[in-house]
Image (cartoon, rainbow, N blue to C red):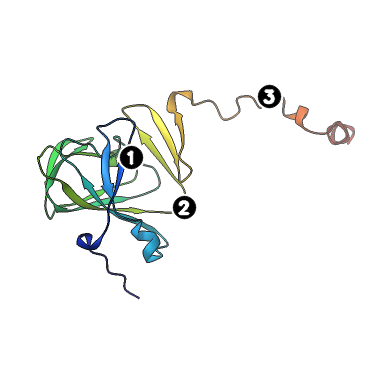
Amino acid sequence: MAKIFNAKNMDFELRNSPIPEFCWHTSPNLSELAQSKVLNFQIRSLDPGKFSYPYHSHRNAEEMFVIFSGSATLRTPEGYTELTEGDIVFFEMGSEGAHQLYNHTDQPCCFLDIRTDLGLDVCDYPDSGKVNILPFREIYQADARVDYYQGEDHVSEHWPESIIHKKKSL
């Protein structure tokens, strides 16, 4: 069954952050209302002088913005581009798809934010060096990366001696 949503008929929730420059309004989670299995989508409104989420990319999700009204400046690895009403922007997986919006105008910018949801995603934040494991929102500093086998050199200590000795006697 088709689900129809219209931004004019929605209540938007204000989403503040501890950093005042990151502030936006968002619709209810439309993907939940539509019972979507692989798309996550909401309508967002970005106030004048505000930034969207921190500059980021997705390792396991594609994302798209459809600008309904107003305009904003888009930051990508290629630079800065003004988006206006009617623009559709696609962000690929990986660092090439990094993005962030800034509303440089005196009017709100309203847009549809669509992202694939394959169950698990990792976001990278180049400006702050963070990594975010979604949907759990486990956030780490990327420079804490270690070798896969670090700390595993005493593996036999975690096993019962009866099993370890059994192998040695064979």
Distance between the Cα atoms at labels 2 and 1? 16 Å
The mark nearer the N terminus, 2 or 1, is 1
Q: Is residue 119 left or right of residue 100?
A: right
> Quadrant of residue 123 in the image?
top left
Name the kind of residue labelled 1 in the image.
Ser
Q: Which amino acid type is marked by label 2?
A: Gly
Disc 2 crowd, CA 10 A, few/some/many (<14, 14-19, 20+)? few
Residue at coordinates 12% horizontally, 55% vertically from top-left?
86
Does the CB distance between marks 2 and 1 fall below 8 Å? no
Q: Position of residue 152 (x, y in %)?
A: 66, 27
For the residue carrying disc 3, how many other residues have a C-alpha within 10 Å: few (<14), some (14-19), or many (20+)?
few
| Marks 3 and 2, the one that precedes in the sequence | 2
Question: Which numbered disc, 3 or 1, marks the residue closer to the eye?
Answer: 1
Q: Taking 4 as reference, is 76 above or below it? A: above
Instruction: Using the image as rendered, state which of residue 95 and residue 111 is in the foreground.
Output: 111
- Decide: is 145 above or below 82: above
Q: Residue at x 31, y 73 (%)?
A: 2
Residue 110: where, in percent of width, then height? 18, 51
Label 1 sits on a secondary structure element that is strand
Q: Position of residue 141 (x, y in %)?
A: 44, 27
- In this figure, which residue is indicated by the disc labeled 2? 119
Q: Which mark is residue 70?
A: none
Q: What residue did someone put label 1 on? A: 57
- Left or right: residue 8 versus residue 128 is left
The answer to whether residue 153 is left or right of residue 117 is right
Residue holding disc 3 = 153
Residue at the image point whose x is 29% and y is 35% from the top:
55
Residue 61 x/y as whole percent: 37, 49
